[in-house]
Image (cartoon, rainbow, N blue to C red):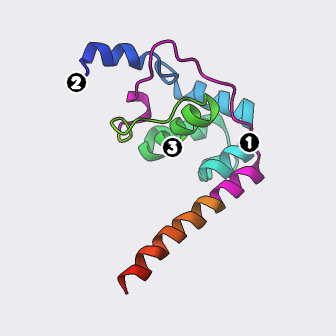
């Protein structure tokens, strides 16, 4: 079992530790732009007259959307290792990373690459769902 002191030490290796939502969003917009964030997140605030201020306001009010953006930041922008089974259900800011682990270069993304990835994920989900139904007959 991990002590609280050890967890806090490991949390400090999390790129989200101490990072303001506004700063994180500005980094993502500067690197990817609104179009890519909109394709990846599908938040209306990234599509209709997007601005940092209105998006931060929405994200502060909407926990699931903020966690989705934080996951994007951790795993696509900073390319940190995926959450362990034990930490999968924790919010992104509460996850730990081993000491000395450095973020990698951001994942290169295009709107097209995101749409293809989403279509592939939807297709494999549909395939898995379909297998379950056909076995029940």
Q: Alpha-carbon distance for marks 1 and 2? A: 38 Å
Range covered by the magenta-colored residues: 90-118
Quadrant occupied by the N terminus: top left
Disc with the residue nearer the chain's start (1 vs 2): 2
Nearest to the observer: residue 33 or residue 12: 12
> Residue 125, image x and y in percent?
52, 65
Task: Look at the numbered disc 1 and give the secondary structure of its residue.
Answer: loop
Residue at position x 53%, y 70% in the image: 126
**Residue linked to disc 2:** 1
Nearest to the observer: residue 55 or residue 25: 25
Q: Pointer 1 and pointer 3: residues touching (CB < 8 Å)?
A: no
The verdict on residue 92 being magenta is: yes
Q: Alpha-carbon distance for marks 1 and 3? A: 17 Å
Residue at position x 67%, y 44% in the image: 37
- Which mark is nearer the camera, 1 or 2? 2
Q: Quadrant of residue 11?
A: top left
Nearest to the observer: residue 112 or residue 32: 112
Disc with the residue nearer the chain's start (2 vs 3): 2
**Residue linked to disc 3:** 68
Magenta segment, principal secondary structure? Answer: loop
> Residue 53, image x and y in percent?
60, 35
Disc with the residue nearer the chain's start (1 vs 3): 3
- Which mark is nearer the camera, 2 or 3? 2
> Residue 30, image x and y in percent?
73, 30
Q: Which mark is residue 109?
A: 1
**Count of numbered badges drawn on the protein:** 3
Q: Alpha-carbon distance for marks 2 and 3? A: 28 Å
The verdict on residue 119 being magenta is: no
């Amino acid at each position: 079992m991990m002590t609280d002191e050890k967890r806090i030490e490991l949390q400090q290796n999390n790129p989200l530790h101490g990072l303001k939502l506004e700063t994180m969003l500005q980094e993502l917009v500067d690197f990817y732009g609104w179009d890519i964030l909109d394709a990846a997140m599908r938040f209306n605030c990234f599509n209709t007259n997007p601005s940092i201020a209105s998006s931060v306001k929405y994200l502060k009010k909407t926990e699931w959307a903020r966690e989705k953006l934080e996951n994007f930041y951790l795993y696509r922008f900073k390319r940190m290792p995926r959450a362990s089974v034990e930490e999968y259900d924790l919010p992104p800011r509460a996850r730990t990373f081993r000491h000395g682990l450095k973020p990698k270069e951001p994942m290169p993304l295009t709107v097209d690459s995101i749409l293809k990835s989403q279509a592939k994920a939807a297709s494999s989900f549909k395939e898995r769902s379909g297998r379950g139904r056909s076995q029940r007959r």
